[in-house]
Image: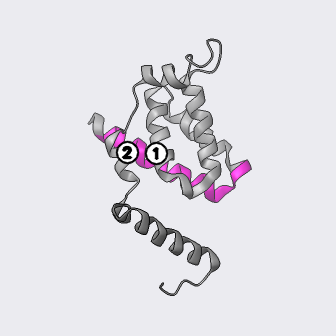
Amino acid sequence: MTDAKTPFELMMQQAQEMVKAFNPAMSSFDPKGIEKMWPTMPKEAMEMWFGKGISKDGLDAKTRLLLTLAGLTMQGAQSETALRQTVRHALEAGATKDEIAETIAQMSMFAGIPSMTRAMELARQVLDETEDDKS
């Protein structure tokens, strides 16, 4: 073991060593690779799995994704990959940039300014990517 300074750092270091022992390929795992494999789910698939397929009179996929975005904002930096994917999916489901920003901003009252700011940065990255793709 290297020189971890806090109990949390020691725990994380031990967890990483355990993962490498169980599956050496995990030492090079990058969650961002998941984003590259399946960057956006089609709106129809979202509606089938997460929208009207669950409850005919329930929430649509866009609303469900905005709620998911709110929850991921509350988690802070530990959900970067999921947050970026949720922003992509929300756009695909019809959410506007303003709705995404408002959802994240609303969480500042519950998650705090740092979590809201980080979520805004991540969302902005996705929104910038989508603008670049349209150009």
At x 62%, y 81%, the residue is 6
Chief SS of the magenta region: helix
The label nearer to you, 2 versus 1, is: 2
Q: Residue 45: x percent and y percent?
A: 44, 23
Left or right relative to 68: residue 40: left
> Dots 2 and 1: beta carbons under 8 Å?
yes
Q: Is residue 117 visible?
A: yes
**Range drawn in magenta:** 109-132
41 or 88: nearer the eye?
Answer: 41
**Mark drawn on residue 123:** none
Element under disc 1: helix
At x 46%, y 45%, the residue is 84
At x 64%, y 78%, the residue is 7
Q: Quadrant of residue 69?
A: top right
Residue located farthest toward the left when viewing the structure as drawn = 135
Q: CA distance from mark 2 to mark 1?
A: 8 Å
Q: Is residue 15 above or below residue 135?
A: below
Disc 1 residue type (three-letter): Arg
Residue located farthest toward the bottom when viewing the structure as drawn = 3
Please, which colouring scheme is shown? one colour
Residue located farthest toward the right when viewing the structure as drawn = 109
Disc 2 residue type (three-letter): Glu
Which residue is denoted by mark 1 in the rendering?
A: 84
Q: Is residue 50 above or below residue 133?
A: above
